[in-house]
Amino acid sequence: MTRALARLGLWLVPALLAGGCAMLQPQPEAAAEPPPPPAVEVVVDAPEALQRLLLTHLDIARLARDAAGEAIAENELKRLENATPAEARALLATEGYMDAEVRTVREHDSQVTPPRPRVRVRVTPGARTRVASFELKVHGALADAAERGDETARALLAEWRAAWALQPGAAFSNGSWRDAKNGALARLRSAGYAAATWQSTAADVDADRARATLALEADSGPLFRTGKLVIEGLQRHDAASARNLADFDPGTPATEGLLLDYQERLQRSGLFERVSVTLDTDPARAGAATVTVRLSEAPLQQATVGVGISATNGPRILLEHLHRRPFGQRATLRNKVEWGAKRSVWEGELSSHALPGLYRNLLGGAAERIESDTDVVTSTRARLGRSYDTQRIERLAFVEVERARKNPLLAATGTRTDLISGTLNFHGVWRDVDSIVLPTRGQSLALQSGVGRVHSIDASGATGQGSGAFSRLHLRANGWRPFGERWYAQARAEVAQVFADSDVDIPETQRFRAGGDDSVRGYAWRSLTPQVNGVDVGGRVLATASVEIARPVSEKLPSVWWAAFVDAGRAANGWSGFKPAWGAGLGLRWRSPVGPLRVDAAYGDEVESWRLHLSVGIAF
């Protein structure tokens, strides 16, 4: 008996454990009950936009949503029915339909049990009110200046009236009337009249003729001019580092563009994490309004470490260091070091903080070692220059000296040669775009030019045959245009050439290569270039072009676009026999606050394969 009970216990324990585990397992959730049907169905027969308006705001429609599953007393439903036509006409009037006809019809939905009432609202909107004429008047300092013959004031008034949103023939509604008034007032304030207000606004609507006559009078108030510049939040940097970026004198008209440009320059300086520029809008101090700059400084030093690998250069390690005030001086020191299996490079630059006139002085240098299948090329270079940087124009003038040494790995492939070059260079960018971060309309032009001389020295120390003078020119144009409904296009054209006798040995850094994210997609970076003994070298000429169209993926995701593009181009030794490589593909764009993040899949016609490209920002 004891053995039998023991055997029974041994059998029951696993069974109970299994049953317990089964009970511990999550049980399937009961299917969610469908929401109860509305107590009354409301149907609106009207154009789609008006249908949405009425279904959102009519009392009877709100009741149908809020009282789902609850019975509605017949007298309450009848009251709402009777009130609906007048309520709907009032809502339609806000959209400019002043003579709309509205009636309700009671129906029954026999498809549900128990049958529920259906109220159908039938709308005949009639003619929409349109603007017949408008009159914009202004008083105050702006009007006084215009009467005295001030051309700036007259031009502002003309632009202000031309920009009025409700021109004759435009559809009139409460929303468009409000937006037009706000926009016109904002335009006056952004032009330096920060205290501008409306004295009177009137819209005379003729419902029978569906016409609106508009009359508005504004008081511009005084023209605000910049006064004292108050800078707050500095701990390590001098006030001059922020003050020089203002680039305006006391007494300058305090326009919105002036202040935004100043704020943009502060942000782009790299010295500050957060920037705010505000104007004291007290009319009593308009002649010398205080401009307050609130700053939050970036860390004094910043270091970045990265690792990567590529099919061309193999594994690599990247170190970057930034010091925003080295040796206590008003300057920025940047150093970047990259170690790779085939390419190692150091780049450094010491640049002053902004000087009066938005200039910066700079001293830079670089050292590079590149190993190929046939040789090792090492180079060092130093430059001294001055830059000028605004939102529309960038300029950089500098002199540069470079020494490049080419050592063949095998004696049969040649002898060691040194190239020593000196160049005088000018780089410039001009842009006229609606946004420097996310442009959709405008154009830009970039120019790089240089003249110099190269000396070629062979292993014996004698001046080689590759010595001589050369010049260099590189042009790049970009254009952005919206078209159609939410469609956008952009195009790029690029052409470059080194001018020199054919026997002059041009340094690799002065040559050109194509291929990659901002060149010809579908090909590896800088891979579309001539080869010598199977080794890539830079070309003496370059031409690339690109055309792209893009559109938001949906109205709900306006910052996410899809794109289609075609690229073409290459670098070559000369224009004779030049044949562009073609690439085409599709991509996605996320228009982030710091610039577009681009993901492109491109097919390279010459390599007959697809390639993925990732990039951030705009290359001007």
Image (cartoon, rainbow, N blue to C red):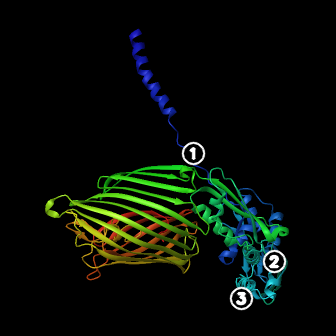
Q: Can residue 83 be seen?
A: yes
Q: Are marks 1 and 2 in contact (CB under 8 Å)?
A: no
Residue found 51% across the figure and 60% down from its top: 351
Which amino acid is tagged 1? Ala
Instruction: Please name the residue shown 52% across and 50% down the image.
Output: 302
User: Where is mark 2, residue-wise?
Assistant: 220
Secondary structure beneath label 2: loop
Lower position in the chain sequence, tag 3 or tag 2: 3
Examine the image and state in which quarter residue 76 appears. bottom right
Q: Quadrant of the N terminus?
A: top left
Q: Give coordinates of residue 396: x percent, y percent.
A: 49, 70
Label 1 or label 2, whichever lies nearer to me, is 2
Q: Mark 3, mark 2: which one is toward the viewer?
A: 2
Name the residue tied to disc 3.
169
Q: Secondary structure at mark 3?
A: loop
Q: Position of residue 521 (x, y in %)?
A: 37, 69
Q: What separation in Å lies between label 3 and label 1 (alpha carbons)?
A: 59 Å
**Secondary-structure class at tag 1:** loop
Query: Disc 2 residue type?
Result: Ser
Q: Is residue 443 above or below residue 588?
A: below
Q: Horizontal and vertical percent for residue 311?
A: 30, 58
The local crowd at label 1, few if under 14, some if 14 to 19, many if 20 or more residues have their Cα within 10 Å, is: few
Choose between 78 and 490: the one closer to the eye. Answer: 490
Q: From what the image shows, is residue 379 above or below residue 298?
A: below
For the point 59% across and 74% down, the residue is 434
Q: Circle 1 sits on which residue?
A: 30
